[in-house]
Image: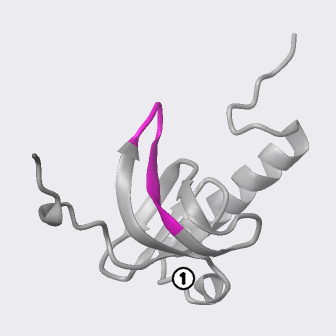
Amino acid sequence: MSILFTGGGDSASTIANLRALADDLERMAMFQPNGELEGAPTLHGWSAVRRPVGGLSGIVEGHPLLGTSHVVTSEVFAIDRERGWARTFSRFYRLGEAADFSQETSE
């Protein structure tokens, strides 16, 4: 029997990511993440997206692998719009401005 890890990658890295996620969620329940946000990429023009799991879509800046580009994040496990952060499966994001759909026009 083989195990399929839906987050991709091998079992050891998936387990390490899940442990880091659980640790972050536990800390967030007690206080605002500050140190974790210092090096976190910033997501501009972001909006929620629906896939089999919820994520965010927007322009990321300072991503360690993707630099500055349009992205759809991994699954969002926690988000605080007022304090401007989100924790996805793989990392923290600082949230810039949200997408403004009121400016869209239909022709």
- Residue at screen point 45% across, 55% down: 57
Q: Is residue 62 above or below residue 91?
A: below
Pick the front one: 46 or 84: 46
Q: Position of residue 17 (x, y in %)?
A: 75, 54
- Residue at screen point 48% across, 67% down: 86
Pick the front one: 17 or 106: 106
Question: Residue at label 1?
Answer: 33
The quarter of the picture where the N terminus appears is top right
Q: Which residues are magenta?
A: 50-59
Q: Left or right of 65: which side holds 23?
A: left
Q: Position of residue 25 (x, y in %)?
A: 55, 64
Magenta-colored stretch includes residue 9? no
Q: Is residue 19 above or below residue 43?
A: above
Q: Is residue 55 above or below residue 37?
A: above
- Residue at screen point 48% across, 83% down: 31
Q: Amino acid at mark 1?
A: Pro
Q: State the scheme by which the image is colored.
A: one colour
| Magenta part, dominant SS | strand
Q: Residues within 10 Å of mark 1 (few under 14, many from 20)?
A: some
Pick the front one: 29 or 68: 68
Magenta-colored stretch includes residue 51? yes
